[in-house]
Every structure is written in C-alpha cells, then in structure tokens.
Image (cartoon, grey):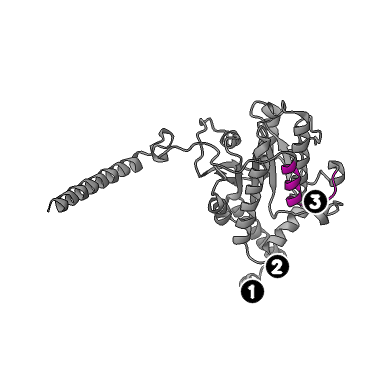
C-alpha cells in the first residue's frame, strides 16, 4: 500500500501505469537477486587414504598433486548458472582427513554454513571390509552429534520432511526409516581392488551398504579413480549436490553385488534388498558378526611435526615460526645456565 500511496501524487497516472511500474520494479529486484551468488556446501569425509582429496580435485577441475589431509581442509568451486543471467553458484567443499578424535572438526562445516544447503559425501574403503562399518559408524555418530548441537528445536524434523520428499512420500518403507535431515551419498571407493574380493564378502558388503543407505534415505554408488564411467557418475553426483546440475546424475540403477552399485535416492527397498526392516544398530551388528571389524586408529603415520612437512610450506608463517624457535632456544639455554649457577652457589 505504501508504494501505491506514494504514486497517488501524480493524478494523471492510470491503474495500468501503476501496475506496469510495480511489475518493472519487481523484475528489477529479481534481476538484482539473480546476480548475487548462491551457496551450497559439500562435506567429504570417511575412510583414511580412500582418495577423498583426489575426488575433490577432479570435482573442482584441479590438477594439484594430492597430499595427506591431516585435519580439516576447505576449498570452493564457482560456476555461472546457465539460463540465469550472471548468477554465480558457489560450492563450499570441506574435507575431513581422519576420523580419529574428529568430533569437534565434524562440527565446523555445519556450524559455518548451517544445514539448509548442506550435503555429505561419505567415502568408504571397499578394499578394507574389516574397517568399513567402524568408519561408517564413526561418521554417522559424528554427524548426528554435530547436527543436534547446531540446530534449533523443530529444524531437524522440518528438514527430514525434505528428505522424505526426496525419496518419495509414497515409498512403502518410509515409516521404518531413520532419515537424516540432509542429503547423504555413500561412495564405496577403491572398487578396482574390491572387485577381486571373495564373492561372499562382496555379498555381505553389498547388503550392509544397501541397508544402511536405505534406512538413512541416502544414495549409494561405487567408485574407482581408474574407471572413467564410475568417476563420471560420482562427479555428476557431486555437481548435482554442489551446483544443482545435472538434475538427475543417475541414468540407470544397479543393484547387483557382482557389479558396481548405483542406487539413487529412494530407489531401494527392504524387499528388494531381501531383508526385514531394520535400523542402523542391527545392520552394524549383523555385518560385524559376518566380518569382524578393527577399531579406528590413526589410519596412517602422521609426521612428528606437520609444520616441517614440505607440503605445508607458508613462507611468512615459517619465518615467524623460526624466530619463535630461536627465542625459545635462547630462553632454554639461559634457564639452563642460571640453574647450573644456582647449583654451584
């Protein structure tokens, strides 16, 4: 009404003139909004040494040589959306290096960006079935704790409703599922090694991953950096979550344990898997009984002093660090001399 009142001064204007002005202003505002960046967030975490950094580099079209991720690393990608003028889409990408003692690190991406445009890529090492559930359980527990800590009352249920819409409100298993409030894609890495495993092991792994993906409302894909078609599927999936295009990265679904799995959101069911409705606790117990699991370790040997790793050089910081080291040595020597002097006295 305020806009109409401000226009009543000019009595020569007709209702049509006023309507045209309002529409023009609305279009101008929409055009201004279209030029502002839209942001989404991808959090990549999972098994140590499974190839998370390599996958992120390919997603972001980077030729960097992967280096060990010691803690939590941030990067981003930017794309101009087609058909939307000059609108730029930004994808924040976080990578967690190790699952050991990582609860506070898992909180960071959620605390920084919230859950509205948040998605997770959970990457598991198929070549190590005896660590698979241990790693997955650690990821899920960490995400649940971080989500509960950084959301307000009612927000989780509202976002679970979006997950339900993603898998299909008419899905017959919907009432039996433990849905997460944001999209999760479970990526089974190192398929090129895993495909040579014993058939029974592959059956157990397949049943476990399909069951847990189904109960979480997640998608499930197998991946190998050495297989171009699998690499393209995972990259398309990350583009879908990070930039919204392609709208459907899954051209076809694959459920056979003897071939790479590719199961979109909501495409699976308890009947198709061949099990009774279950929950994550029972799924984990069943799998751990079939394939005993090793506890989470460091997943590799970290350098004694990561600051001295050649892959983490930073000239200005290294120079300050060197000065502080020299000052520390001077203090230690001075203290040592004084202590000797006091002993002599």
Question: Residue sitting at 62 percent across and 62 percent down?
Answer: 151
> Looking at the picture, how far across and down is residue 11, in whole percent?
65, 72
What crowding class fits label 1: few (fewer than 14 Cα within 10 Å), some (14-19), or many (20 or more)? Answer: few
Apparent side of residue 322 relative to residue 46 in the rendered image (left or right): left
Q: Which residue corresponds to mark 2?
A: 14
N-terminal-most mark, 1 or 2 = 1
Which is more toward the observer, 181 or 10?
Answer: 181
Q: Can residue 87 be seen here?
A: no
The residues tagged by marks 1 and 3 sit, at their Cα atoms, a distance apart of 62 Å
Which is more toward the observer, 21 or 275?
Answer: 275
The residues tagged by marks 3 and 2 sit, at their Cα atoms, a distance apart of 66 Å
The residues tagged by marks 1 and 2 sit, at their Cα atoms, a distance apart of 13 Å
Apparent side of residue 178 relative to residue 118 in the rendered image (left or right): right
- Seen in the picture, residue 126 relative to 162 is either above or below; the reply is above
Q: Secondary structure at mark 1?
A: helix
Assess whether residue 287 is covered by the magenta stretch: yes
N-terminal-most mark, 1 or 3 = 1
Question: Residue sitting at 53 percent across and 51 percent down?
Answer: 105
Which quadrant of the structure image shows residue 126?
A: top right
Which is more toward the observer, 345 or 47?
Answer: 345
Q: Which residue corresponds to mark 3?
A: 278
> Looking at the picture, how far across and down is residue 85, in whole percent?
63, 45
Assess whether residue 242 is covered by the magenta stretch: no
Question: Residue sitting at 19 percent across and 51 percent down?
Answer: 339
> Looking at the picture, how far across and down is residue 125, in whole percent?
65, 36
Screen quadrant of the C terminus: bottom left
Q: Can residue 49 be seen here?
A: yes
Farthest residue to the left: give it: 345
| Highlighted magenta segment, given as a residue range | 275-289
Q: Which residue corresponds to mark 1?
A: 5
Mark 3 and 2 residues: CB-CB less than 8 Å, in contact?
A: no
């Amino acid at each position: 009404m305020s806009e109409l009142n401000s226009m009543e001064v000019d009595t020569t204007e007709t209702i049509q003139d006023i309507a045209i002005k309002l529409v023009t202003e609305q279009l101008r505002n929409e055009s201004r909004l279209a030029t502002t960046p839209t942001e989404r967030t991808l959090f990549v975490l999972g098994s140590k040494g499974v190839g998370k950094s390599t996958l992120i580099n390919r997603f972001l079209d980077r030729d960097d040589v992967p280096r060990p991720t010691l803690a939590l690393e941030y990067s981003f990608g930017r794309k101009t959306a087609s058909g939307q003028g000059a609108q730029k889409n930004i994808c924040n990408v976080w990578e967690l290096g190790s699952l050991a003692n990582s609860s506070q690190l898992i909180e960071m991406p959620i605390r920084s960006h919230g859950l509205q445009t948040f998605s997770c890529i959970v990457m598991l090492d198929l070549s190590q079935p005896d660590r698979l559930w241990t790693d997955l359980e650690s990821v899920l527990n960490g995400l649940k704790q971080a989500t509960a800590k950084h959301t307000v009352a009612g927000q989780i249920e509202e976002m679970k409703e979006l997950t339900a819409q993603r898998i299909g409100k008419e899905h017959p298993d919907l009432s039996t599922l433990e849905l997460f409030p944001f999209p999760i894609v479970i990526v089974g890495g190192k398929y090129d090694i895993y495909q040579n495993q014993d058939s029974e092991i592959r059956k157990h792994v397949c049943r476990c991953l399909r069951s847990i993906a189904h109960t979480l409302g997640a998608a499930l894909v197998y991946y190998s950096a050495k297989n171009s078609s699998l690499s393209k599927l995972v990259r398309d999936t990350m583009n879908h979550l990070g930039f919204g295009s392609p709208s459907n990265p899954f051209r076809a679904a694959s459920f056979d344990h003897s071939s790479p799995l590719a199961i979109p959101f909501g495409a699976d069911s308890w009947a198709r898997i061949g099990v009774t409705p279950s929950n994550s606790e029972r799924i984990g117990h069943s799998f751990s009984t079939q394939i005993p699991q090793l506890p989470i370790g460091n997943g590799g040997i970290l350098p004694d002093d990561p600051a001295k790793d050649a892959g983490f050089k930073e000239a200005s910081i290294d120079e300050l660090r060197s000065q502080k080291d020299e000052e520390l040595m001077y203090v230690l020597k001075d203290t040592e001399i004084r202590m000797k002097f006091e002993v002599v006295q």
